Image (cartoon, rainbow, N blue to C red):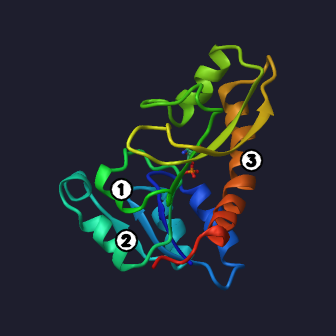
């Protein structure tokens, strides 16, 4: 089975997934794609010997080059790990129920455009939530609205800062996302 990772930032989730998949002989992390030439994930991919593909908005939204490439690469699962752009409709339609994402909150709360990174944890603390967590879901054309695959929660204590919440949530991300990716791949039939 072959996966492609999309990331825009540091890439700690992408790295954990790649490291976990390395233990499975039948799983190949074929490609790391990013829209950000300065993303920390590029260096992580290099260290992990994963080919990196950078693209800009025009390529991503005004051509089907990325979709075609992913089909040619016979990608079985597309994994978004801190990827900040909306997936183009054409790409979502070409890979139905084969694109997943992780959101650092318990959707449907604290989701949607603009709710990413630290803003999420600030909003959770500001709202006085007593818990937060992660949501791993299928991707469709609208931000954070695809079918939920799994959620995991952590307590938010009154004295917690957004950074404290971020740390607890990231621990859940790194613990869950790699395992969900492998479980889904094991359930997939290889692309016809
Ligand atoms: C994580 O909080 C993830 O939930 C969100 O973006 C962040 C990515 O962090 N989608 P990293 O780049 O994987 O460290």
169 up-or-down from 6: above or below? above
Which residue bears the numbered disc 2?
70
Secondary structure under tag 1 reads: helix
On whether ligand 1 comes within 8 Å of the CB at mark 2, the answer is no
Assess disc 1: are there few (<14), some (14-19) or many (≥20) residues with their C-alpha within 10 Å of its C-alpha.
few
As measured in the structure, the alpha-carbon distance from the residue carrying label 1 to the one carrying label 3 is 32 Å
Is residue 154 shown left or right of residue 73? right
Quadrant where the N terminus is found in the figure: bottom right
Q: Quadrant of residue 22?
A: bottom right
Which residue bears the numbered disc 3?
171
As measured in the structure, the alpha-carbon distance from the residue carrying label 1 to the one carrying label 2 is 13 Å
51 up-or-down from 38: above or below? below
Can see residue 28? yes
168 up-or-down from 51: above or below? above
| Residue 91, position as x, y percentages in the image | 34, 58
Q: Residue at x 53, y 28 (%)?
A: 119
Q: Quadrant of residue 15?
A: bottom right
Assess disc 2: are there few (<14), some (14-19) or many (≥20) residues with their C-alpha within 10 Å of its C-alpha.
many
Secondary structure under tag 3 reads: helix
On whether ligand 1 comes within 8 Å of the CB at mark 1, the answer is no
Q: Residue at x 68, y 49 (%)?
A: 173
The residue nearer to you, when weighing 57 against 95, is 95
Give the mark, 1 or 2, whose residue is nearer the N terminus.
2
Give the foreground label among 1 and 3: 1
Q: Which mark is residue 93?
A: 1
| Residue 65, position as x, y percentages in the image | 24, 67
Q: Residue farthest to the bottom?
A: 25
| Residue 50, position as x, y percentages in the image | 50, 76
Is residue 124 shown left or right of residue 100? right
């Amino acid at each position: 089975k072959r996966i492609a990772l999309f990331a825009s930032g540091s890439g700690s989730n992408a790295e954990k997934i790649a490291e976990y998949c390395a233990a499975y002989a039948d799983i190949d992390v074929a490609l790391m794609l990013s829209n950000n030439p300065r993303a920390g994930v590029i260096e992580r991919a290099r260290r992990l010997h994963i080919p990196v593909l950078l693209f800009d908005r025009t390529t991503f939204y005004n051509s089907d080059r990325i979709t075609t490439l992913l089909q040619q690469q016979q990608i079985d699962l597309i994994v978004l790990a801190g990827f900040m752009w909306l997936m183009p409709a054409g790409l979502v339609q070409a890979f139905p129920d084969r694109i997943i994402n992780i959101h650092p909150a318990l959707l449907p709360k604290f989701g949607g455009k603009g709710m990413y990174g630290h803003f999420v944890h600030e909003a959770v603390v500001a709202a006085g939530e007593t818990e937060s967590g992660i949501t791993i879901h299928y991707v469709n054309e609208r931000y954070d609205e695809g079918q939920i695959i799994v959620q995991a929660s952590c307590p938010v204590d009154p004295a917690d800062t957004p950074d404290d919440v971020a740390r607890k949530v990231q621990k859940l991300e790194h613990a869950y996302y790699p395992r969900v990716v492998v479980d889904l791949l094991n359930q997939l039939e290889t692309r016809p």
